[in-house]
Amino acid sequence: MLKCQTLAANSNIIPYLFVYKTELLTSSNSRHLAQLNWTYVSDSGRHYTVGMFHGPNTGHLVVHCNQRVVLIDFHVLESKTYPLFLDDELCELKIEKKNGRFTYAFEINRKADTPRNRERKKTEKKHWRQTLMFFGAMAVAVAVFTGFFIRFDARQKEKNREALLAGQGADAPARIDGLEGEGNTTLIRFSFVANGTAREARLEYPSGMPIILDSGMPLEEGDEFTVRFATGNPGIWELQLGRPSELQAKRYRERALAHHSRLHPELTPRQAECQVGLAYELKGISGLAAFCYQDASPEENPTANRQAYQRLVRDAPFRQRARQECW
């Protein structure tokens, strides 16, 4: 291995290699002598001048570094490569013959297993990790910003929607046309009449089937609730499952009365109806649900169940009015 090590390489300056190529035609009549020079700047900032003389006819080759001969070879008439160390950098003088012509190149070998290349690979890996960390941090920042923007935009749209429904809203009864459960969500299909035109809509409810409403009543196909829509744009609506229509409230009352009468045959029809009416006056739909599911366990209905019914009928206002009005 040829060396030209008059200088040490300890700084962090990136090495440069200025490479110039030439080619000469070899023939019996040619007497040209190939003469080239390359300048290499090491990472210490020092310059190396590498030159060569090559006779295309004779094949004699002389290589010098900083005016000192470092290689002599004879009869170089085919392609050949000569390694040369400049400091700890492996360089290669390449002579290539193709179609009767010689071309020359002086290049840094960055793939060979040398101390310098091993150090270079470590540095490249470090820089690559730093690059990945930088772009990873950028990706996280973009994701956070995007999420914030999406949430902000959703909040603004919700505020605009609420303002529009409050200022230009109208109420209409909405009939539940279908319930389609899928995992932890249920698709509610319903229809209503807005501005004299029948409309159909869908709502994804965040609960699997069966859906137990806040009142304790299950949502069923055919139920009727209130929908509020923007009169100027009926496509903006809000299905209010906490506001059953008058017809639906009547159905709930009839259902509660039938169940209460069946479980308490000792009561007269007037007494049973009076107690159900009190439950509705005091607790609304939740009171009717407590009577409808007074024999249910908390596992069957977590809201309206045996405990909810006992709390209601033992409550002081209910007991006092029941004694005065229902007996």
Image (cartoon, helix red, strand yellow):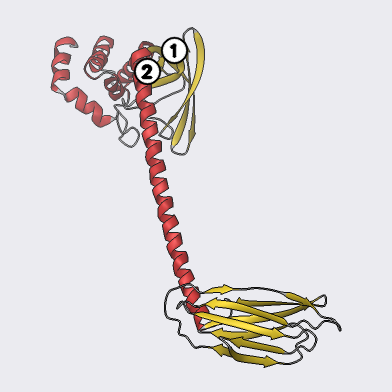
Percent position of residue 131, x then y: 45, 61
Question: Foreground residue, 198 or 224?
Answer: 198
Question: Foreground residue, 114 or 52?
Answer: 52
Q: What kind of residue is marked 2? A: Leu
Q: Quadrant of the C terminus?
A: top left
For the point 17% across and 15% down, which residue is it? 322
User: Does residue 36 sit above or below 206 in this rendering?
Assistant: below
Name the N-terminal-most of marks 2 and 1.
Answer: 2
Could you say which disc has been placed on residue 232 in the image?
Answer: 1
Distance in Å between CA atoms under marks 2 and 1: 9 Å
Question: Foreground residue, 287 or 2?
Answer: 2
Q: Residue tagged by mark 2?
A: 164
Left or right placement of residue 180 versus residue 26 in this view = left
Percent position of residue 96, x then y: 74, 79
Percent position of residue 174, x then y: 43, 16
Q: Is residue 130 visible?
A: yes
For the point 78% across and 86% down, which residue is it? 77
